[in-house]
Structure formats: structure tokens, C-alpha cells
Image (tube, grey):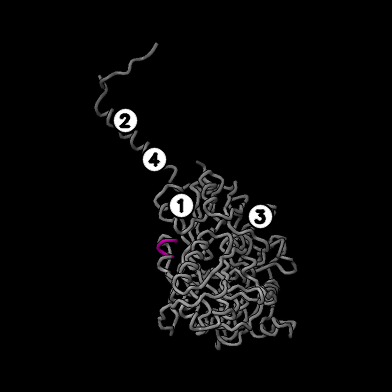
Amino acid sequence: MFRTVPRSLGTIHPLSFIIAVLGFICFSAVFSDFSSAALPPRFGGEATAGICTKITNFLPALTVEDDEFMVSSSIYEPLVKLGEDGEVVPFLLQKLPVESDDRFIYYFALKDNIYFHNGKKLTAGDVLFTIQEVLKNRRSPYSWIFQDIEGAAEFRKGTKSEISGVKVLDPLRFEIRLKKPEQSFVASLAMPAAFIMAAGVDHRETPVGTGPFKFSEKRASGSIILEANRQYHGGRPYLDRLVFRVIPDLEDALIEYKRGKLDVVEIAPDKVKAIGTSEEGKLLKGLGKRLVFLDENINEPPLDDIGVRKQLFFAIDRDAIVEVILGGEGRVESSLPGLKKVAPKRAAAGKLLQLWYPSDDRTLAFVAERIKYDLFTKMNLQVKLVKRSQGELLVLEKEKEPAFILRTLLYPDTLTGTMDEMFFNSKYSTNFSVLALRMRKSSDVPVGFSAVSVVPLYSYKRNLLVSSKLSGAKISYLNGIIFEEVFRRLL
């Protein structure tokens, strides 16, 4: 027998009805907001992040891509880190190093009872090993971090077997002597190349660090699996496992994210505004800028003519790149100290000039097309676009160098506030330009911005979309997610 629903309140007391309605409203408000409320952390589960780069080598000294930084910083850790407001804070150190009065010597003390993933205790010997490995690696663009250490140049050349400026005092204490005072030396120790590696281990295939996650396996597809470091000195991470899945195209990765197959995905600059107004998840903006610039081979005619290079500098429409290709999500970088504006001129057709660009970046493919168009319409330069892997762009044989390479380079805002500082400050004019920007096998290539050999184009910040199924996600100064405090939500 069915019960008839009354059409009126009948004999229900008005006060009882009001209390019931208010109770229902309060319950509904609490319940509806439950999914967005702060939930207590829970252990277990895994997170899957999409990465564009297939990582072939785990050496921190060779990491140059944002994806490599994100993987590396989950495994390894630095002596110091950079905070959100730019301050340098001790990490594997007990405190920031003490400077000598003349600022030539720094005295360091490591925290006690920190262990690598292989069970070995962290010592000052591991710090020495890390510095030696960076300096010995001829392919690393980061040897500038340690090149001001006394004896570093001789060690790098192979004329000395030890670095005279690095002394291990005891298992936890060491000192570093510089050739000259360098204000940014301690801050530079936050860079990925300075991540501390366990001594006596081949880190190319099996990375061993002190970080919250440890290496488990690398699959044929390129996917990398990390397991929680349950003995981590900062307390075990909430997640049991991290999976970094290789998907070269950002649009394909976004489709996988929407299907629930990825928890973290990078968003292309031109898609940021659309994502920002959707309910896809939480959009995090990087704390470091990625610079995009055109590297010129000044030995390749007609680029051997500085007059042509000056015209080329002003021929590229940076505003169109930022507004059209990036959807406004970028900043034009076009200053060159001391360079007066020169109008581009069309010349007689010459030989075909190759422009290489990263094969795994669709945005840079459009940028390369724009450069090709500008150079042809304004200077009659014939350009052929060629896709190349990041590995091919990092190490080149001189006789195979193309005329142009479209490159990107990360730098934290906290290290250098503007592109001008990094490109043109005398501190960087020799070491950083040669070793980090041009990335050649040898450092005898003439470099200098008076030669207009590098053309800055624009800078932008990386954007990562994090699933609402994850909580606690923050982005680091290296433009990757800090997974240590991330946990899966019970939805």
C-alpha cells in the first residue's frame, strides 16, 4: 500500500519546519563542500605524471629539461634550496655555510644520519665525488657552478688529480676555497647539477640519491617508476609510487589526463587561458623562467657577417610569437645592450640554411615556422627546418653544426631576475654563455654578445595541471611538482 504525500503542511508546527529546513541547508552546504575541503593526508596509492622527454641518462650534471628536473629532484637532493621568495635555505646542511672574513673560504657541515637509497650514510666524501663528476663531464653545461673553486680548472683539464680548493675535514664537515669572492656561489648549489650523488655508483642507469623516492625501473617505453623511500630523513612520502609516463605531444597528454590516465600534465602556453577557466584541476605556474633563444653559427655564411646578424636580430617578430603562438602567455626578450636598431634588408638568394629545433615541442615548431617566414620575407634568407632530439642539440660536432638552433634554457627567477642579467652580466659572459648557452663540446668557440651570436626571443613560465584526485601538490623552483607531500584523496 502506497502512502500519499500530503500537499500541505497539515499540522506540522511552523517552528519544527523551520528547524528542519535550516538543518537540511546546513547539512547540504557541508556535504557539497566536502570534496573541496582540506582532507587529512593518507598513505598509499600512486601518481602518474606525463613527461615529454624520454630520459636516457640520470646524471644530474646532464639534466637540462623541465621533465628531467622533476624526475631528478624526486631522487636527489641539494645542499641548499631556493625558497619561493628567493632566499637560500640549508637542506642537506645543518645551516648555511660560514664565510671567512675575506669571503674566499666557505665552511660546510652536513646533517647527520641522512642515508642514500642504497643504505650508505651521506658524508663529505659524497659531496667531493659530486663536484668531481660535474667537472669531469665534458658534456655538462653546468661546470660553471664549480669553476671558481681553486684548482677546478686544473682538475677539469686533467693536469691535476685532485681539486685543491675542496677539503674533507671529517665525515660531516668540508670546506671550499674560491679563487675570488663570488656572491652567488652558495645559491648556485641549488642547481640540479649540484644534487648530491652517492660516491662509487654509476648514476647513468641507476640513480642513487637521498630523496623521498628511489629508482625502481625504467621500461622500454621510457616510463620511469619510482618507489617511496620509507627511510627518508624527512619522513616517508605519502605516495607509494610515482610513474613518469612519456607522451611527447602535450595535446595527446592532455587527452590522457582528461581520460583519467594522468594525474599531472604540462599545459602548452596557448592553452593556459582555456584551462584556467575550466574545472579540470589545479593549475600551477612555475617559479622559474624558461628562455627561448636562437643560437647562431657565426662561422656559417652569411652569418659570419656581423652586419647580417644585426639585421637578423631585428627581423624576427617577437610580438607575433608571444601574442599569436603563445596566446599572450610569455614575455618578449629583445634587448641587446649597446645594439642600435638596424632595418633588415633583402639580399640576393644564398644557400639553404638549416634551423634545428626540438622534435618533442609543438610550440617551438610553430616558433621555428615564424622565424623561417620572417627571415625569408624580410631578408630573403632561405631556411630549412629540421627536427632533432634534445641529445642531438646538446652535443654537436663542429663540422655538422647547422646555421641556427632554437634552444630553451631554464633559470630560476631567484638566481637572476632578468634575461639581461644572465645573458650580459660580466660574471656570465664567458662561462655561462659558452658552457650553458652554446653547449658545444669545446669552449674555444668565439662567444660574446658584442658578436650578436645569440638572439633572445621570449621567456615564459611552465604551467602544470594537477588532478583534483591529488592534494598537497606544490611546484618547485625547478618547475616540477614536489611529490614529497602529495597524497591521493578519497573521493
- Three-letter amino acid code at the position of disc 2: Ala
Q: In the image, residue 353 lies at what x, y percent?
A: 56, 72
SS for tag 3?
A: loop
**Do the residues bearing badges 4 and 3 touch, measured as CB atoms within 8 Å?**
no
Q: Residue at x 58, y 75 (%)?
A: 436
Which residue carries the number 4 mark? 30
Q: What's under tag 1, amino acid-wise? A: Lys
Left or right of 3? Residue 412 is: right
Image quarter in which the N terminus is found: top left
Where are the magenta residues, as a range?
321-325
Disc marking residue 282: 1
Q: Residues within 10 Å of mark 4 (few under 14, many from 20)?
A: few
Q: Percent from the top left, x then y, of residue 317?
A: 42, 70
Spatial CA span between label 4 and label 3? 44 Å
Residue 322 lies in the magenta-colored region: yes
Q: Earlier in the sequence, mark 4 or mark 3?
A: 4
